Image (cartoon, rainbow, N blue to C red):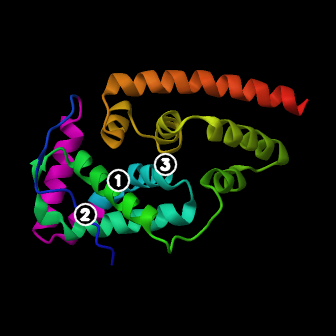
Amino acid sequence: MSNVQPPNEGSYPEQPGQSDQNELLVELFKKVQDGNQNAFSELYEIIRRPLMAYCLVLTRTVDDAKDLFSLSIAKMYEGRAGFIGGNFEAWIFTIVRNSSRSLYRSSQRRQAEPITDDVADETASSFEEADEAEFVRKAIEKLPQEFRSVIMLKYFGGLSVGEIAIAEGIGQELVKIRLFRARNRLAKYLRHLVEEDL
């Protein structure tokens, strides 16, 4: 297994508005630390979607995202003794970021189709929907990374502004600004792509 280390032991400060969700996650994770497999299953179901969305943002390929997700879950479990409280989501997102750096440096990475191609293929039930998905994919690919990541986390991952702030390591106001600017750029790109296609 990779030599990616979980974040340093310690406590991660909570973000405003995250206390109820964080309390549940911390409570479940304490049970995981005590060896409760049912708590691990419940925790997994809660964090699976936002973590996978973040993995997709970091890797932009389905296969690499799955690898990153698996590695991150393994590292979370291996490093479970290192979490002593605070913001659980910040802790696990840090593990994902550190793991992504390790995968990126690895020369053994597999090449795969971009995630947005797979999403378009799987969700399109007609040629018209596939064309629309292709327009959106092209527009998203043109966005700068900081805009692309917040759009992917918000609309493909279903994360809240607070969760995106934790995942990206930025403030909630900056997330809102980036979402606003990203939506504006997407609208311009989509208008331009439609005009090109006519």
Q: Which residue is mark 3?
A: 57
Q: Are marks 2 and 3 in contact (CB under 8 Å)?
A: no
Q: Judge left or right: residue 111 versus residue 166.
A: right
Q: Residues within 10 Å of mark 2 (few under 14, many from 20)?
A: many
The quadrant of the picture occupied by the C terminus is top right
Q: Residues within 10 Å of mark 1 (few under 14, many from 20)?
A: some
State the extent of the magenta-drawn residues as a range: 17-42
Q: Which residue is mark 2?
A: 76
Work out whether 178 lies above or below 64.
above
Q: Position of residue 135 (x, y in %)?
A: 74, 38
Question: 168 and 22: which one is in front?
Answer: 168
Disc nearer the start of the sequence (1/3): 3
Q: Residue at x 55, y 66 (%)?
A: 63
Q: Position of residue 29 (x, y in %)?
A: 17, 58
Question: Looking at this rendering, what residue extends furthest in the right direction?
Answer: 198
Q: Are marks 1 and 3 in contact (CB under 8 Å)?
A: no
Cα separation between marks 1 and 3: 11 Å
Work out whether 99 lies above or below 186.
below
Q: Residue at x 85, y 26 (%)?
A: 195
Amino acid of disc 3: Val
Cα separation between marks 2 and 3: 19 Å
24 in the magenta segment: yes
Q: Judge left or right: residue 129 versus residue 166.
A: right
Q: Mark 2 or 1, which is nearer the eye?
A: 1
The numbered dot on residue 97 is: 1
105 in the magenta segment: no
Amino acid of disc 1: Arg
